[in-house]
Amino acid sequence: MTERRRHGVTIRAVAERAGVSAMTVSNVINRAGRASPATVAAVHAAVAELGYVPNVLARRLARARATTVGLLYSGTRAPFLDAILVGALRATNARGLQLLLHEEVPGEVAAAEAAARALARGGADALLLVPPFAELLGGSPALAELGLPVAAIATGHVLPGIATVRIDNRAAMAELTALLIARGYRRIALIAGNPRHSDSAARVAGYHDALAAHGRVADPALLIAGRFDRTSGEEAARTLLTGAVRPDAIMCSNDDMAAGVIAEAHRHGLVLPRDLAVTGFDDTTLAARIWPPLTTVRQPAEDMAFRAAERLIRTGDGAEDATDLIVPHAVVERESTPPRF
């Protein structure tokens, strides 16, 4: 079925396919009234078969504001994602609203669009996105057709058609790099994050900014792409620690990868932080619990998610908010980066 035909499907067509009334279809979709399990199953089957997308814009207007916020996220569990979930729950619970979660494996734009439509069919009146789904759906005509307010958290820059809540990733990484330079580190490596995340590119740019400001040029051998998980941190550290030029500091684009670097450094017999400085990013609960405790950038993920969800709720109330909100960050200094002199 073509995309045009999918969006032309009406609630009456779904009712006919399921063998029920249009009112029953509406009640099942909006979880109102009562319906037998068999009826619910028949309606959901017809919705899936026909590709029906509810007129969520009309539904929102009828209810005056959003009542359900849909969160689209990847299945990789990490402290950063946990903080986002807590923040979104705080915002929705404070207003007596529902948070609808949809786990999706990051892939192509079409898959992200299908996930957004699934949230809309499930009752979401607004969407909350995290990378890389924010980048995949920014400017998407399919997303615009849903008529939903959309906000994204932790992106590296503004995205078309999406309200953003973020820190200045470039400035934050530049500050952290400058701290290492000031403490006497000469061979500073960086393990970047997933290249599909806009915040990863911004952090790499900040690393280059700080090196250039101190008259240095980044060594390509000391810049390695990771995936924002512990395993990729271990893999990148193995490459860096067995290379021709061993770094005296390894910066990581998140705390999970930094934990992987520390584990791999221990396997190589290094004594940390004496033999190697390590930094993270995000200041998750992990950062202060490992040894040595991580110097990192504090990105207030829980507060960012709360603000983004609040913005979606306020949009339904007719309030006007900034489309790009940059919240403060902070460099948190701990034992993993002692002075070299």
Image (cartoon, grey):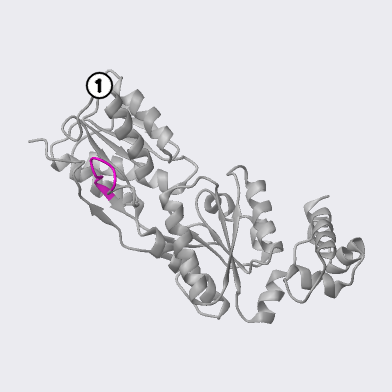
Q: In the visual, does 186 lie left or right of 172?
A: left
Residue at 31% across, 25% down? 240
Q: Is residue 24 left or right of residue 205?
A: right
Main secondary structure of the magenta stretch = loop
Any part of residue 254 in sight: no
Q: Residue at x 61, y 74 (%)?
A: 67
Confirm whether the magenta stretch covers residue 292.
yes
Furthest residue in direction left, as rendered? 341
Residue 1 visible in image: yes
Q: Is residue 153 left or right of residue 16?
A: left
**Amino acid type shown at disc 1:** Val
The image quarter in which residue 138 lies: bottom right
**What quarter of the picture does the C terminus occupy?**
top left
Whether 195 is among the magenta residues is no
Q: Nearer the viewer, residue 161 or 82?
A: 82
Secondary structure, mark 1, is loop
Residue 255: give x, y in percent of width and height.
35, 44
Q: Which residues are magenta?
A: 289-296
Q: Nearer the viewer, residue 119 or 135?
A: 119
Q: Quadrant of residue 116?
A: bottom right
Crowding at mark 1 (Cα within 10 Å: few <14, some 14-19, many 20+): few
Across and down, in percent, residue 50 comes to 83, 56
Please name the residue that numbered disc 1 is placed on: 245
Pinpoint residue 6: horizontal percent, then vertical percent: 80, 57
Tag count: 1
Viewer-proximal residue among 295 and 292: 292
Residue 43 x %, y %? 83, 62
Residue at the spot x=40%, y=58% of the render? 301
